[in-house]
Amino acid sequence: MRKNKFKLNIGSILEAEEGAHVEFDIDASLKLDDKNEIPLTAAVQVMKLQHEVNVTAKKFTAETSVICSRCIKKFKQKISIKLIERQFLFERPRVVEDADDLYLVDMKNATIDIAELFRQELLLHFPLIPLCSLKCKGLCAVCGKNLNLGDCGHNHDVDISSIETQKPLLKLKELFKQSQNGKTTDKQTKSSTKPNQKKI
């Protein structure tokens, strides 16, 4: 069984006086969902306070695969967070305003699990509009070619009145299907008409 590097034994901190702390580096992969694991590194400090332990993570960096919103190419996106800080309480409070932001110390086993803390921070810092490059030229609105790989010869200053006839999103739809299915499909859907039936 693989050791959980995000589950920390803090027994020595709990037995020490207030203000006692430990520092260490984390270099591990965090399971973001059922399919994806993200490698990350961070400098972590755990400090004992009066009613909780304070956890800070500095120099947090992670790398994940995302799809460019312009050219739909998969690329590696680096995520950097200067400071992450949360308190892990010794006891559960009577009133909990936000259960998703509540972290508790496992007093029975003298451990804390910082995996969920890192997971939430990663989701909060995911780019809303991923770009492989600020200079990404995207796809041709006419043929769907990735313009970063070269010019296709089409006029990219498309007149609005011609959009209906050129149907620029049709090629994008095909490319999206290819990326989902992993297959190339150039078949066109044929429409069939039913014969008119006379009402009796």
Image: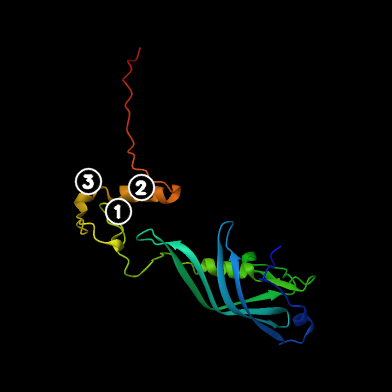
Name the residue located 65 percent from the left edge and 71 percent from the top edge: 114
Q: CA distance from mark 1 to mark 2?
A: 9 Å
Label whose residue precedes the other's in the sequence (2 or 3): 3
The answer to which quarter of the image holds residue 51 is bottom right
Give the labeled residue for mark 3. Answer: 165
Three-letter residue code for mark 1 = Gly
Say whether marks 3 and 1 touch (CB < 8 Å): no
> What whole-number distance in Å separates the C-alpha atoms at marks 3 and 1?
15 Å
Picture residue at 77% right of the left edge, 85% below the top: 16
Secondary structure under the numbered disc 1 in the rendered image:
loop
In this rendering, the label closer to the viewer, 3 or 1? 1
Residue 136 in the image, given as x and y percentages of width and height? 32, 66
Q: Please name whichever residue, 10 or 27, is drawn nearer the observer in this view of the structure.
A: 27
Residue position marked by numbered label 2 in the rendering: 174
Q: Is residue 142 above or below residue 53?
A: above
| Label 3 secondary element | helix
Circle 1 Cα neighbour tier, 10 Å, few/some/many (<14 / 14–19 / ≥20)? some
Compared across the picture, whether 48 is left or right of 160 comes to: right
Looking at the picture, which amino acid does disc 3 mark?
Answer: Thr
| Above or below, 19 relative to 166 | below
- What is the quadrant of residue 67 in the picture? bottom left
Q: Is residue 54 left or right of residue 60?
A: right
Q: How far apart, in angstroms, are the residues tagged by discs 2 and 3? A: 17 Å
Residue 154 has which mark? none
The numbered mark, 3 or 1, whose residue comes first in the sequence reads 1
The image shows residue 52 at horizontal and vertical percentages of 71, 78
* Residue 12 visible in the shown view: yes
| Residue 115: quarter of image | bottom right
Q: Residue at x 68, y 74 (%)?
A: 88
Tag of residue 144: 1
